[in-house]
Each structure stands twice: as structure tokens, then as C-alpha cells.
Amino acid sequence: MYRIGQLAKLADVTPDTIRYYEKQQMMDHEIRTEGGFRLYSDNDLQRLKFIRYGRQLGFTLDAIRELLSIRVDPEHHTCQESKTIVQKRLNEVEGMIAELQNMQRSLQRLNDACCGSDHSSLYCSILEALEQGATGLEVHGDCKSC
């Protein structure tokens, strides 16, 4: 059995994180010492690691709750339910990657549009493009004063 500080250390979280998951009804502390300290089992540690890894993967607390319920009661659930939750998160991540790639291309165009010399920024193509928004990235190719 572990006290909250020991459990937190083993799972690489803070005791406040454990308390938060308890408030979210994702963890429980059924056993207490005579002095009122919470005691946790190896199963609690495993659950905490499950939650933590789910958070690292970017799952919402609701999604983790669903996955936990599937894990706790496997006879009333299917692998397809877990897969659906993971597929949804994968689709979100793929969308974020596409967004980041668009951002990277836009930033690369901004970077390439400017000569980067030490002259005044009065006619800087980067600043002009930012003022004009996304269309400004296509309009200017070089610093006007370069």
C-alpha cells in the first residue's frame, strides 16, 4: 500500500494531480489509515499510469473515463469501442499535423520573402505580409529595399 506522496512519486505526478483525478471520479481511495491518510494499491498505481499515459496522448478526461470503463468491465464492451476512441484522437492529431504543416509552409514563405539584412524595416516584406494577412504571403517575393 502507498500513501499519496509515494503513489505520486511512482507515477511521476503530484499529489494534487491524484486528488484532482479523485474529484473527477477517475480514481478512488477506499482505504485510509487510522490517522486518516489515504492508502493506494498497485491497482491504483496502474490506473494512475493509465490515466497519465492517456493524458500524454492528448485524450480528454471524458475519453479516458470511457477507456477506463471499458478496461474495468471488458465483458460488456468491445475492442471496437476502444478503437473508435483512439481513431477519433488519431484523426484530431492528423488534423493538427496538417495545420502545423500549413503553418510551416507559410512561415517558410515569410522567411524566404525577406533578405534579412540590417536595413530599416520600413519596407520589410515580412511585416507587410503580416499586415495583409494570408494573401500577403503570395504577393511579395523580396524586400523592396534589398
Image (cartoon, grey):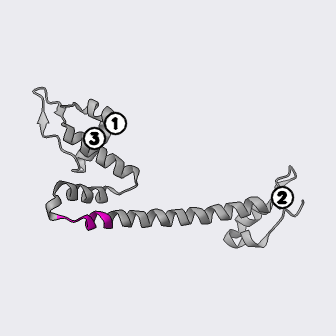
Does 78 appear in magenta? yes
Residues at marks 3 and 2, CA–CA distance in whole angstroms: 54 Å
Q: Is residue 61 above or below residue 101?
A: above
In which quarter of the view is residue 84 placed? bottom left
* Rendering coords of residue 19 (x, y %): 26, 41
**Which residue is found at the position 68% from the left and 69% from the top?**
133
Q: As drawn, is 45 to the left or to the right of 103?
A: left
Per the image, the residue denoted by label 3 is 18
Quick one: label 1, few (<14), some, or many (20+) residues within 10 Å? some
Return the residue nearer the eye: 16 or 80.
80
Q: Position of residue 89 (x, y in %)?
A: 39, 63
The residues colored magenta run: 77-84
Q: Nearer the viewer, residue 118 or 66?
A: 66
**Which residue is labeled 2 in the image?**
122
The tag on residue 14 is 1
- Check disc 2: other Cα within 10 Å, few if <14, some if 14-19, many if 20+: few
* Residue lying at 28% horizontally and 41% vertically, measured from the top left: 18
